[in-house]
Image (spheres, rainbow, N blue to C red):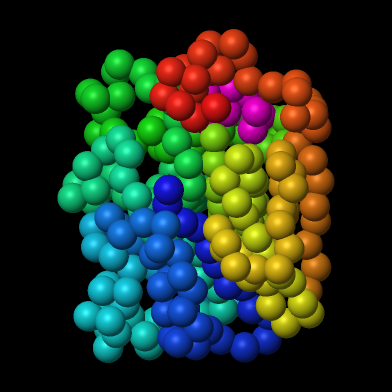
Amino acid sequence: MCGIGGIILANRKLKFDEVYNLASRLEMRGRDAFGFLLLNRHGRVRRYFKLPSPATEVLAELEKLIAPIIESSYGILMHTRAATFGEPIINRNNHPFRISHYYFAHNGYCSYTSPDWSEKRIQTDSFNGLFAPLIQRIEKGEALKQVVWKAYEEYCATGAFWLYDERLRKIYLFKEFMPLTYSFHAESFRFASTGEPTHLEEGWIIEIQLPYHGEIERYPTEDFRDSTNDWRYPPSCQKKWQSQNYI
């Protein structure tokens, strides 16, 4: 169900082939749409792009247009979509999403969907059930590690996400239930839904400050309880998931 991934480099620019290879790997998790965010060395957004087509088709058919932009960038954050709520042919329903200086892509779902979402301009559960509530709380002064479970519990959500704050030039990765793997060295940081050597722990956040200098921060979200027998979601979520054979 969807794929997220990215490459952040310290001292060299991206190569089209390495971006294509990552996109093709993520495409196995979703072919309904492809989107990405390109960053310069200092973390400014160079391009914000998405189309309702498979990743490899977008990159292959638009290579002459896209490759020069990719190869003049130092970072890319991407998403391949397997659509749940929100028709992918309506491109605003596809990831990444943007609110002000925040960008977001999610690999997962919200089991509880509000009836009024069908009346909203963007009808995707990831936007209305996670991204918008997270940003509302962050803008009130709360830290991501303090609010992430509030958003997940409110809409019975699961999955991993990347969040980029262009003002602070920080990337945040979070994982619950869906896989998220990563690797980092002095020259590069890479992450993907699958395929990298290190698995991000359930309920943990990775924070990366740009420009990248080979360092990351890892910390748990608040109120995270590490027990297979101690569900952190309310009973309504468990009942919903059981009815849909999720647990």
Q: Residue furthest top?
A: 235
Instruction: State the image coordinates of residue 106 (x, y, percent, origin top left).
Output: 48, 46
Look at the picture and state if 235 lies above or below 165: above
Q: Is residue 139 left or right of residue 117?
A: right
Instruction: State the image coordinates of residue 219 (x, y, percent, origin top left).
Output: 81, 46
The foreground one among 193 and 119 is 193
Residue visible at 27% across and 88% down in the picture: 64
Instruction: State the image coordinates of residue 198 (x, y, percent, origin top left).
Output: 73, 63
Q: Is residue 152 magenta?
A: yes
Residue visible at 38% across and 22% down in the picture: 113
Magenta segment's dominant SS is helix
Residue visible at 46% across and 26% down in the picture: 245
Q: Place residue 129 in its image quadrant.
A: top left
Residue visible at 24% across and 25% down in the picture: 118
Look at the picture and state if 143 lies above or below 117: below
Q: Is residue 129 magenta?
A: no
Stretch in magenta: 147-157
In this orientation, does residue 136 appear?
no
In this orientation, does residue 53 appear?
yes
Look at the picture and state if 4 lies above or below 87: below
Q: Is residue 78 left or right of residue 209?
A: left
Instruction: State the image coordinates of residue 59 (x, y, percent, origin top left).
Output: 31, 77
Q: Is residue 117 left or right of residue 234?
A: left
